[in-house]
Image: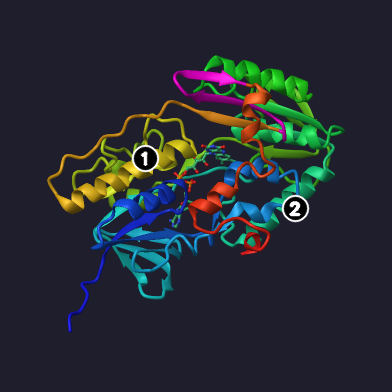
């Protein structure tokens, strides 16, 4: 009788866009000697592309949290472990809880560090680990918006812009003010994105203040629905009974920084990488990084994270078959984005032959759906979306 050699692990910390892309790539290319272990603190994948709308419209939140249970048909090929990774050693990732088959640590031969970034809620629901808890938080936000009469949105990135229009479209009686620190929206994209966005904000009656900053009180705003006057740095005053922060992201790089301080860029806390997406630390050629936590030129989008995740996995497969292989290198992705402005408007920068900006409802309408195409995430994870599966 022969005993099967235990499989070696490729561990991915963070179960979002990078991990899903890498896992799907692995299904095509990973040799049978290895398996994928994804460590993710949430019970379900968060489809945050639709969170701005789900903060306003209720009844479909369950479609935005997708179970990981069917990503693999056998634990021998891969598994998603629900746990928080608390430490990384040269050989293991330590967990905050015991997990069947592993105990409190998972050995790795290769590691992909894909912990992404934190955004203020409701941009992401990082601290809500169960589906019920995350849905509850979205419902609280819906109730807050319903109750408010004058909403102040702080930050005119994609989340602030989409949320502003969603609120005005569904509650035209509510006043919405959007304060943006720059003169231009979406500065990583073509100027046309900005111009068309301004047109749509005007059309929906969103009050804009640009090139100015809200003075956020120490400890943040108290959500007690009292009408208060909020000041801006330039001395303007805005009346609002609900204030929502839609400001920037904080890379979650501290965990890796403990093992490899030299791979963290002190200026922005992102993880420095080599062109091969190995971390910029020669002591760890078996650790890769990608997505929102990685210090790459790409604009931080799910699409870029996806491409980078695939490259990490391709390079790992090359190293498995030949440790001296020449690895493929990363080419930054042309910046592309789709901003959903209410249920039937949008502005997109797309690259088909060249980069162009478009608002034509006729051309974009095939991308419109009430759940911002959440069904595709269910397909990625092997559980097609239906009335029955949505509650799993
Ligand atoms: C509201 C919103 C809307 C967006 N809309 C779009 C869009 O329409 N199109 C688009 O292309 N992009 C969009 N983006 C950007 C896109 O979501 C991100 O670029 C993408 O999710 C980055 O993927 P990632 O895998 O790098 O990390 P993330 O999505 O940030 O995920 C990181 C994961 O790691 C987990 N994690 C972190 N630390 C640990 C740990 N120690 N242990 C275990 N798990 C851990 C987290 O729980 C999380 O699930 C949007 C972002 C937001 C916030």
- Image quadrant in which you'd find residue 15: bottom left
Is residue 35 found inside the magenta-colored segment of the image? no
* Residue 348 is covered by the magenta coloring: yes
Residue at coordinates 84% horizontally, 32% vertically from top-left?
172
Asked which secondary structure carries label 1, the reply is: helix
Q: Earlier in the sequence, mark 2 or mark 1?
A: 2
Element under disc 2: loop
Q: CA distance from mark 2 to mark 1?
A: 34 Å
Number of marks: 2
CB at disc 2 and ligand 1 closer than 8 Å: no
**Percent x, y of residue 104:** 37, 71
Location of the N terminus by quadrant is bottom left
The quarter of the picture where the C terminus appears is: bottom right
The answer to whether 282 appears left or right of 378 in the picture is: left
- Relative height, residue 199 to residue 88 (above, below): above
Q: Which quadrant of the figure has residue 106?
A: bottom left
Does the image show residue 349?
Answer: yes
* Dots 2, 1 in contact, CB < 8 A: no
Q: Is residue 72 left or right of residue 44?
A: left
Q: Main secondary structure of the magenta part?
A: strand
Q: Which residue in the protein does label 1 denote?
A: 308
Highlighted magenta segment, given as a residue range: 342-358
Q: Position of residue 290 (x, y in %)?
A: 37, 42
Q: Looking at the image, which residue sits at the far bottom?
A: 1
- 129 or 276: nearer the viewer: 276
**Which image quadrant is residue 306 in?**
top left
Q: Which residue is mark 2?
A: 59
Residue 234 visible in this rendered orientation of the protein? no
Residue visible at 25% across and 40% down? Answer: 280
């Amino acid at each position: 009788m022969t005993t099967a050699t235990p499989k070696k692990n490729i561990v991915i910390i963070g179960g979002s866009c990078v991990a899903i892309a890498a896992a799907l790539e692995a299904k095509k290319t990973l040799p049978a000697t290895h398996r994928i272990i994804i460590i993710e603190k949430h019970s379900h994948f968060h489809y945050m592309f639709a969170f701005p709308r789900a903060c306003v419209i209720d009844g479909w939140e369950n479609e935005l949290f997708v179970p990981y249970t069917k990503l693999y048909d056998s634990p021998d090929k891969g598994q998603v472990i629900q746990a928080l990774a608390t430490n990384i050693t040269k050989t293991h990732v330590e967990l905050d809880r015991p997990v069947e088959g592993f105990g409190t640590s998972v050995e790795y031969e290769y590691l992909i560090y894909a912990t992404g970034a934190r955004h203020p809620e409701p941009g992401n629901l990082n601290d809500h680990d169960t589906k019920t808890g995350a849905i509850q938080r979205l419902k609280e936000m819906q109730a807050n918006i319903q109750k408010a009469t004058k909403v102040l949105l702080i930050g005119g990135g994609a989340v602030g812009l989409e949320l502003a229009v969603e609120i005005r479209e569904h509650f035209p009686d509510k006043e919405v003010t959007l304060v943006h620190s720059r003169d231009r929206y979406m500065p990583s994209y073509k100027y046309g994105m900005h111009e068309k966005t301004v047109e749509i904000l005007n059309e929906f009656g969103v009050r804009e203040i640009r090139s100015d900053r809200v003075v956020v009180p120490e400890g943040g705003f108290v959500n007690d629905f009292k009408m208060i006057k909020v000041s801006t740095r330039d001395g303007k005053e805005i009346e609002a009974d609900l204030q929502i922060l839609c400001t920037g992201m904080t890379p979650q790089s501290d965990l890796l920084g403990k093992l490899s301080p030299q791979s963290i860029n002190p200026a922005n806390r992102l993880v420095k990488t080599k062109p091969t997406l190995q971390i910029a630390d020669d002591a760890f050629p078996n650790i890769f990084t990608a997505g929102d936590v990685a210090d790459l030129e790409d604009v931080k989008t799910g699409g870029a994270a996806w491409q980078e995740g695939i490259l990490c996995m391709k390079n790992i497969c090359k190293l498995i078959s030949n440790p001296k292989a020449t690895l493929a290198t990363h080419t930054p992705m042309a910046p592309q984005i789709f901003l959903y402005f209410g249920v039937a408007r949008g502005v997109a920068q797309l690259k088909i032959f060249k980069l162009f900006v478009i608002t034509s409802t006729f051309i974009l309408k095939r991308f419109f759906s009430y759940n911002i195409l959440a069904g595709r995430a269910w397909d990625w994870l092997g559980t097609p979306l239906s009335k029955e599966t949505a509650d799993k």
